[in-house]
Image (tube, rainbow, N blue to C red):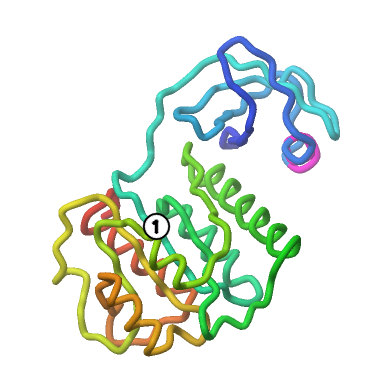
Amino acid sequence: MRIPRVFTTEQLDVGSLIDLDKGAARHLTSVLRMASGQELILFNGQGGEFSAELVEAKKDKATAKITGFTEADRESQLQLNLGIGISRGERMDWIVQKATELGISQISPIFSARCEVKLSGERLDKRIRHWQQIAISACEQSQRNTVPTINRAVSLEHWLTNCDSSLKLVLHHRTDKRLHEMANTDNSIGILVGPEGGLSELEIEQAMARDFQPLAMGPRVLRTETAPLAAISIIQSIWGDMG
């Protein structure tokens, strides 16, 4: 069995004992059936990963002793900033999970004109926490040691105004521009994708007025959960660490 990887917010130091949270403890002991003496890997998003050994393994309580440190850096040299129209159902979960696996740096949920999801207050905060946990779980699976940030949900205008990426791209199928035709002299790339109904003509014009370049992913119209993943994959292949 592959050695399990667990994210923790605790300070990690070789030789110290760490009490894992109840969720991690339950997963290790009840799902994976791990017992005292078995190995795991811990990371806290501050760089590298720590080898550890379970010294206590109960249903809701697990304590690990840190035995070593590895300066493992599996991050892309690209800083990828995804602004994505909030979608219904599990589409956003899928986008967050797969974008994390592909190396996204941060994701900003966006309320746009055709966004059908109406969230605010505690319900919205709960959804953001849910997406952040999905990103953490994806890092545990994909062996990333840096967790991408799920930003607070904002309006499209707010995101356009505050996106400071060097290369800015707005995805839609009404253009014939392709990624291989574009030049990139920096590692900072912003990607804007609409919700299920796409971005309106006005929103595309607003993005282009903010120096976003229109980009198509080919001759076919891609769904909102497919388009950003295709874009990230191609960007990582051309300028990043994939391919």
Residue 26 included in the magenta stretch of the image:
yes
Q: Quadrant of the N terminus?
A: top right
Residue 98 included in the magenta stretch of the image:
no
Most foreground residue, 165 or 182: 165
Q: Which residue is drawn at 69% across and 71% down?
A: 119
Q: Where is residue 86 in the image (x, y as percent from the top left)?
A: 56, 72
Left-right relation of 117 to 141 = right
Q: Residue at x 52, y 84 (%)?
A: 113
Most foreground residue, 115 or 101: 115
Q: Is residue 150 above or below residue 30?
A: below
Q: Residue at x 72, y 58 (%)?
A: 126
**Amino acid beneath label 1:** Asn
Q: Where is residue 185 in the image (x, y as percent from the top left)?
A: 15, 54
Left-right relation of 17 to 46 = right
**Residue occupying the far right of the picture:** 59
Q: Quadrant of the rendered structure where residue 172 is?
A: bottom left
Q: What residue does disc 1 label? A: 81
Extent of the magenta region: 25-31
Q: Position of residue 188 (x, y in %)?
A: 29, 53
Left-right relation of 43 to 106 = right
Left-right relation of 229 to 88 = left
Q: Which residue is drawn at 31% across and 57% down?
A: 165
